[in-house]
Amino acid sequence: MSQKSLHLRLGVVASLFALFLVFFAIPNFVFAPSNVGKIVLSPKFWPYVLSGLTALIGLGLVFNALTTASDVPFEDEETGHPEGSAPWMRLGALAVIMVLMMFGLPRLGMVWTAMLAFAACAFLFRTRHPIAALVCAVIVPLLLYVFFAHVAGVAIPQGNFVRLP
């Protein structure tokens, strides 16, 4: 499979999925009260934003596939699939991280568990930027907590041991 055909297929599927979300799934399955004061707090706002971004990325992939002249093969010596049991071991380790997250949520809380899971996944997938991954593992859950707890007024589950303000 060439990179061009992969981009074309992914772009078409992403665009069709975004259309499905916008015209069927979100209107029929996401319920929102009519008296929401701020639009960003509406339960329908963020699914529509994510659907729009998915459609934009899908159209970008289709545009890239249609304007690219070369037909480069997707897999070569450097990007070929790894042989052996390493992919299955990583998949098993990811399953263990997910199970540990479920046990950690009531004890540590959502923010601290998300930090640990983010860092564990970053190192499991052998990121090229470990310092940036650790910084993001701490900063992103804290910023999300600040937004939801203090701006949106949504209660974020806290743990039994450490509570955030």
Image (cartoon, helix red, strand yellow):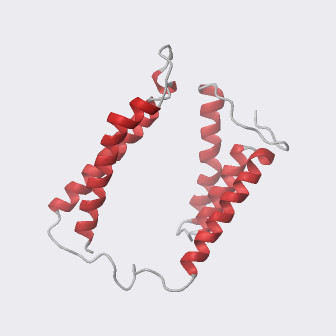
Q: Position of residue 163 (x, y in %)?
A: 80, 38
Percent of width and height locating residue 88: 57, 76
Residue 56 screen position, x and y as percent: 30, 45
Left or right of 70 in this view: 139: right
Instruction: Give the residue at x 26% y 54%.
Output: 12
Comparing 150 with 37, the one in front is 37
The C terminus lies in which quarter of the figure?
Answer: top right
Q: Residue at x 76, y 53 (%)?
A: 103
Circle count: 0
The answer to which quarter of the image holds residue 85 is bottom right
Does residue 66 appear to the left or right of 123 in the view shown? Answer: left
Residue found farthest to the top:
35
Q: In which image quadrant can residue 153 be found?
A: top right
Vertical side of 123 occupied by 138: above or below: above
Q: Nearer the viewer, residue 146 or 58?
A: 58
Residue at 70 percent across and 44 percent down: it is 110
User: Which residue sits at x=41%, y=41%?
Assistant: 50
The quarter in which the N terminus is drawn is bottom left
Q: Nearest the camera: 21 or 7?
A: 21
Residue at the limit of the structure toward the right, as seen here: 161
Q: Position of residue 22 (x, y in %)?
A: 34, 36
> Quick one: 138 or 63, which is closer to the camera?
63
